[in-house]
Image (spheres, rainbow, N blue to C red):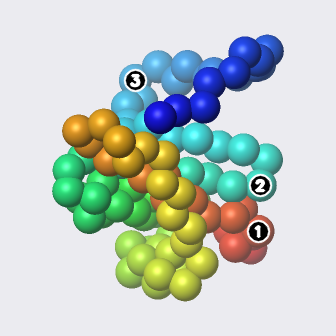
Amino acid sequence: MAVEYPSITTLRFDVIKGWTIAWPRLEAEDFLMTIGSARPLEDAMRIAYRELVFWLVNDYGFDTWDAYMLLSQCGQAKLGNFVDPKYTIGAAVTKGYLAA
């Protein structure tokens, strides 16, 4: 079962030539989120958190282990899809934790 409704939505996309990412990313005013989709659920979670670690390391200057430690305490998981053959998880961190 799904809840569907009409809406008017505004999206903004930035195209950065020569730059690639392996999995979808979302950035809002107050958080960063990466998406993982796989089966079993643990693999979807692992993908989402791994990609968020990569993002923190590559774009925010974190040491890999510091990023893991931050996310182990402050990371949030959002279940996005639990009914299709693959599960979808969003791993997020509030931008307030990224401020120097």
On residue 96, which mark appears?
1
Instruction: Give the Cα separation between the discs numbered 2 and 3.
Output: 27 Å
Which residue position is annotated with label 2? 30
Q: What residue type is labelled 2?
A: Asp
Proximity of marks 2 and 3: CB atoms separated by less than 8 Å: no
Relative to 59, 11 lies left or right: right
Residue visible at 47% across and 19% down in the picture: 17
Instruction: Give the Cα separation between the discs numbered 1 and 2.
Output: 7 Å
User: Of label 2 and label 3, which has the lower sequence position?
Assistant: 3
Q: Nearer the viewer, residue 63 or 85?
A: 85
Disc 3 packing (10 Å; few <14; some 14–19; many ≥20): few
Quadrant the C terminus occupies: bottom right
Percent x, y of residue 18 = 40, 23
Nearer mark to the viewer, of 3 and 1: 1
Q: What residue type is labelled 1?
A: Gly
Instruction: Give the Cα separation between the discs numbered 3 and 1.
Output: 29 Å
Residue visible at 56% across and 68% down in the picture: 76
User: Of label 1 and label 2, which has the lower sequence position?
Assistant: 2
- Where on the picture, by quarter, is residue 85? top left
Disc 2 packing (10 Å; few <14; some 14–19; many ≥20): few
Which residue position is annotated with label 3? 18
Residue 34: in sight, yes or no? Answer: no
Proximity of marks 1 and 2: CB atoms separated by less than 8 Å: yes
User: Judging from the image, what secondary structure is the residue with disc 3 in?
Assistant: loop
Relative to 65, 40 lies left or right: left
Percent x, y of residue 35 = 43, 46
User: Judging from the image, what secondary structure is the residue with disc 1 in?
Assistant: helix
Q: Which amino acid does label 3 sit on?
A: Gly
Q: In this view, does 3 lie above or below 25?
A: above
Percent x, y of residue 70 = 54, 80
Q: Nearer the viewer, residue 90 or 69?
A: 90
Of all residues, the one furthest to the front in this rendering is 1
